[in-house]
Image: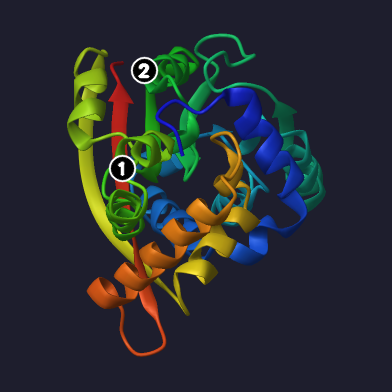
Amino acid sequence: MNRNPDPSRVAAAFHQKAAEYDQHVQVQKRVVANLVGSIATSASGGATSILDVGTGTGALLEKLHGCFPATQLTGIDSAPNMCLRAQQKLGTTATIVTGDARCLPFDGALFDLVVSASALQWVPDLSTALHEMRRVLRSGGWLRLAFFCEGTLGELQHCFRDAAGRISGERGTVTSRLHHFHTLEEVRTIVTDMDFEQCVLGVETEIDWYADMFALLRSIKSIGAGSVAGGASSGLGWRGILNEASRLYQERYGEPSRIPATYTVLYLTARIRL
């Protein structure tokens, strides 16, 4: 996937896969559970109005409603079908709108808590999105985010790079197609320049297991993430790279009948000054 995915392509890809999304997001479900657990046991759990950015099918809002049934919930996503699924799931307990994280269609200082889970890694301009989230927070409000950062799918990326170099000598071409996940330092640089009273950044690792590399690729494609960077390559050369990458993956990281896929999750907790 490329370094700066086209936002319209991202929205279209997830729009197309909305119906089957929930069947293929095991690690995302764990991230949601971790985020909700930390919110429920902290001061930010007392919010009366919550915005979920990149709400997807509404899994995070659904769990937050279970914890805080009286809280006003709003979700936003760039993929219309994701919004439809979320609204169907949540009914009258939440308001779901279609929109862009980089230009939130809300007045400033509107929410006590802004959350997001497993979505911001697809936003090409993270700084703009974070500043928009800060804009819509009230004084004393909280920002609680979790998204995939550098290290995510590292096994897959390393094997693709090396396979491309061995098969076609086009390591650079393949590297340009791989998604750039933000580093912890990149995020730290952004939030350091924002007027947060408190800001805590942390990283945790999640691992999912698959039968082989092709099963992993099918899973990625099934949620829409496999086509956000311009579509897949084809032809005998690409097939050779895929086969060699699969061989390297099993050789380097595999166990009998399965391979691991690592997801590095960045958690951000910040509070606006009163």
**Does dot 2 land on a helix, a strand or a loop?**
helix
Left or right of 221? Residue 186 is left
The crowd level at tag 1 (other Cα within 10 Å; few <14, some 14-19, many 20+) is some
Looking at marks 2 and 1 on the same chain, the residue that comes earlier in the sequence is marked by 2
Name the residue rendered at 45%, 12% in the picture: 135
Identity of the residue furthest to the top in this view:
107
Name the residue rendered at 73%, 40% in the picture: 15
Please name the amino acid that badge 2 sits on: Ser
- For residue 194, which quarter of the picture? top left
Task: Answer whether residue 206 is visible to the viewer in this image.
Answer: yes
Label number found at residue 14: none
Where residue 117 sits in the image (x, y, percent)? 47, 44
Q: Nearer the viewer, residue 87 or 142?
A: 87
Q: Is residue 181 above or below residue 158?
A: above
Please name the amino acid that badge 1 sits on: Arg
Query: Which residue carries the number 2 mark?
Result: 127
Where residue 256 sits in the image (x, y, percent)? 35, 90
Task: Answer whether residue 77 is visible to the viewer in this image.
Answer: no
Where residue 151 sits in the image (x, y, percent)? 26, 50
Q: CA distance from mark 2 to mark 1?
A: 29 Å
Name the residue rendered at 58%, 45% in the picture: 232
Q: Is residue 4 above or below residue 221?
A: above
Q: Nearer the viewer, residue 166 or 20?
A: 166
Eye-nearest disc, 2 or 1:
1
**Does dot 1 land on a helix, a strand or a loop?**
helix
Left or right of 92? Residue 226 is left
Q: Is residue 265 above or below residue 54?
A: below
Query: Which residue carries the number 1 mark?
Result: 171
Q: Is residue 236 above or below residue 136?
A: below
Colour pattern of the rendering: rainbow
Left or right of 94? Residue 6 is left
